[in-house]
Image: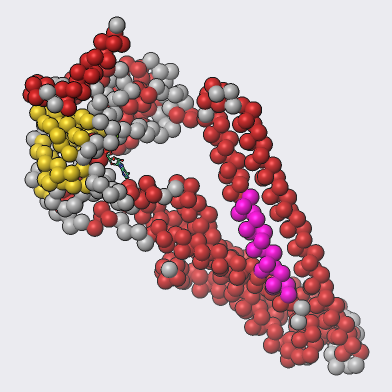
Amino acid sequence: MKERLWRYITRYKALLAAGIVCVLIANVGQMIGPIILRDGIDDLTSGVTQAKLLYYGGAFVAINLVAGFFVFLQRRLIPTVARNLEYDLANDFYTHLQKLPLEFYQTSHTGDLMSRATSDLSAVRMIVAGALLYAVNTLFGIALILPLMLSMNWRLTLLAFLPLPLVTLTTKIVSKSIHDESTRVQEHFGTVANRLQESLAGVRVIRAYVQEAAEMENFKRVNTELVRRNVRLIHLNSFFTPVVNFIIGIAVVAGVWYGGLLTLRGQLTIGQLFQFILYLEFLIYPMLQLGIIVNYFQRGMASMSRLHEVMSIEPVIDGAVESDEVTDIKGEIEFRHLYFNYPGNTEPALKDINLRVQPGQTVAFVGNVGSGKSTLVSLVPRLLDAEPGQILIDGRPIHTIPLRTLRSSLGYVPQETFLFSDTIFANIAFGAPQADSREVERSALEAGLAEDVEAFPNAYATSIGERGITLSGGQKQRTALARALIRQPRILIMDDSLSAVDTHTEAKILAHLRRVRFQRTNLIVSHRISTIKDADLIVVLEDGYIVEQGTHSELITRGGLYARLYEKQIFEKELTAA
Ligand SMILES: Nc1ncnc2c1ncn2[C@@H]1O[C@H](COP(=O)(O)OP(=O)(O)O)[C@@H](O)[C@H]1O
Ligand SMILES: [Mg+2]
C-alpha cells in the first residue's frame, strides 16, 4: 500500500524535488537573517553611522526577500504535486469503481463509497500537501539551526529547547481530538441533512400518517446533538492556543533569563543573545508542526488503506480472453446447462437452464416472484457472470465477446427505472450521445412516449426529477425503454419494465416492437399474460427451473402452471370489469 502511494508520488518527482530545494533555500535564508542582525547590533553598539544602518538594514531586507520568494515557490510547487496526486488517485479510483462487479455494489454502502471517494482522497492528499511539506521544513529547520545554537552555547540551548517537545506533544494530542471531533460533527451534519432530505422527499407519507410532530421531534433531536458537538469543538479549539502559548512562553523566558545572565557575564554579546532568541522563536513553529505532521501522516495512511481495500478488488469481468474479431452480434442466445448461484446463497437461483433463442425471436419469461426471471435476463448483458460455456451468443461463449461489443448491441431495461435529473432528451440519448433530435423522437415514438412528451412545457427539453417535472411511473418506464431503443439494439431485454404502464398501452408498445422483430431478439419478462401471449416462445420459470415452454396455445392446451396463471388473470380481469 505504501508502494502504491509511492508510485503516485514518484510521477511528480521533479516537481517535488524542486519544491524541496525551495524549502531548503528558504530555511537557509531564515538562518542567515539573525546572523546579519547579530553583527549589526554588535557593530552598532560601537557607534551608529548611516552607512552601517543602511548596510545591515539592506542586507536583512534582501535576505528576507529571497527567503520569502522561495517560501512562495515552495507553497506553489508542493500543493500542486499534492493536487495532481489526488487527481490521479481519484481518476483511478473512479475508473476502478466502474469496473467492479455488481455484487460489490450490492454489498457496499453508497455513503461509504462516497466518503472514500471524497474525504479519504483528501486525507491522502494531505500526506503530501501537509505532512511532507511540513516534515521537510521541520527537518531542514532543525538540522540547520539546532547545531548553530548548540555551538553558541549548549547549556543555554538545552535549557531553552527543553520545553519545546511539549509543544509537539500538545499539538499532536489536541489536533487529533479536534480532527476526530470535527469528523464527528461532519458525520452528524450528514445525518441531519439526510433526515431533512428524507422528510422533504417523504412529505406525503409523513402527512398521510400524521407524523409531522414526531418528525419535528426527531429533527430537533439530531439538531441538538449537532450543536452539542460543535460546542465541544469550540472548547477544544479555545483550549489549544493558550496552552501552547504558555509552553512557548516558558521556553522564551528560560532563554532570555539564562541568556541575559550569560551576556552579563560577558560570555555572549547582545547581538548573539538576539540571534539566539530569534532562532528559538524560529524553531517553535516547526516543533508545533511536528505534532500535526504525525497526525496527517497517520490519517493519510489509514485513508490510503481504505482506498486500497476497494482498489485491490479484482474487476472480474475484465479478465476474460476476448476475441477481437467479434464486432457484430446477430442475436442468437443459448443457455446450456446453466446454473447460477448468488454468492452466499445456499440454493442456486437458476438450475439446469437449457434454452435456445433464434435471432429475431420474441421470447417471454413468466413465473412467480423469485422464480429467477430477472437473474436469467441479467446474465445476457453480463451484469451477472455465469460459468464459462453456459451462455453462448451467436454460438460463441459469451465471455469471449468483447464486453463493449456485447453491451453496445444490447438494450437492457431494468425492473427498477433509473433516470437522471436532467432533460428528457438527455435521458433518452444517454447511451447514444451523438443522437440527434430525430432519433430521440423516433425512439420515444416506439416506446409510446412521444404523445406524453409533446404535452410537456418544453417537450424534449423538459427537465425531470429534482430539477423539473415529476413523471408518472409509466412515463418513467417508457423513457427508460426509449433509452434502450435509441441504440437500435440487436437484443432487447425488458425486465417487467412496463409494469406501471396500463395494459392497453403495454400491448400496443409490444406489438410495435414485434413488428420490427426481424432485426431484433426480444427477451421480455412480464407478469401480464395478456400482453405476451403473441410471443414466439413463452418460457415458464419456477424455483429456478424451466418448467414449461411453448407458444401460448400449446401451453394452454397443456394445462400446467402457465394455464393456471392465465386463468387466474382472466378471472381477476373479469372481477375488476364487473
Ligand atoms: N442480489 C441477489 N443476491 C442474492 N440473491 C438474490 C439476488 N437477487 C435475487 N436473488 C434470489 O434469486 C432468486 C431469483 O430472483 P429473481 O431473479 O429476482 O426472481 P424474479 O425476477 O423472477 O422475481 C430469488 O430467490 C432471490 O431471492
Ligand atoms: Mg424480477
**Above or below 335: residue 363:** above
Q: Image quarter for residue 1?
A: bottom left
User: Is 99 placed left or right of 220 in the picture?
Assistant: left
Q: Nearer the viewer, residue 410 or 186?
A: 186
Is residue 176 rendered magenta in the image?
Answer: yes
Viewer-proximal residue, 276 or 551? 551
Measured as percent of width and height from the top left, residue 129 is found at 56, 64
In the image, 222 versus 155, the foreground residue is: 222
Name the residue located 56 percent from the left edge and 67 percent from the top edge: 298
Residue stretch rendered in magenta on the structure = 166-185
Is 316 above or below relative to 59?
above
Residue 227 horizontal side relative to residue 497, left or right:
right
Relative horizontal placement of residue 165, taking residue 425 as reference (left or right): right
Residue 11 picture quarter: bottom left
At x 38%, y 59%, the residue is 311
Q: Identify the colour scheme used.
A: secondary structure
Q: Residue 406 appears at what percent x and percent y?
A: 20, 44
Which image quadrant: the C terminus?
A: top left
Where residue 362 appears, as percent x and y from the top left, is 14, 29
Which x, y percent locates residue 486? 25, 31
Which residue is situated farthest in the top direction here?
Answer: 578
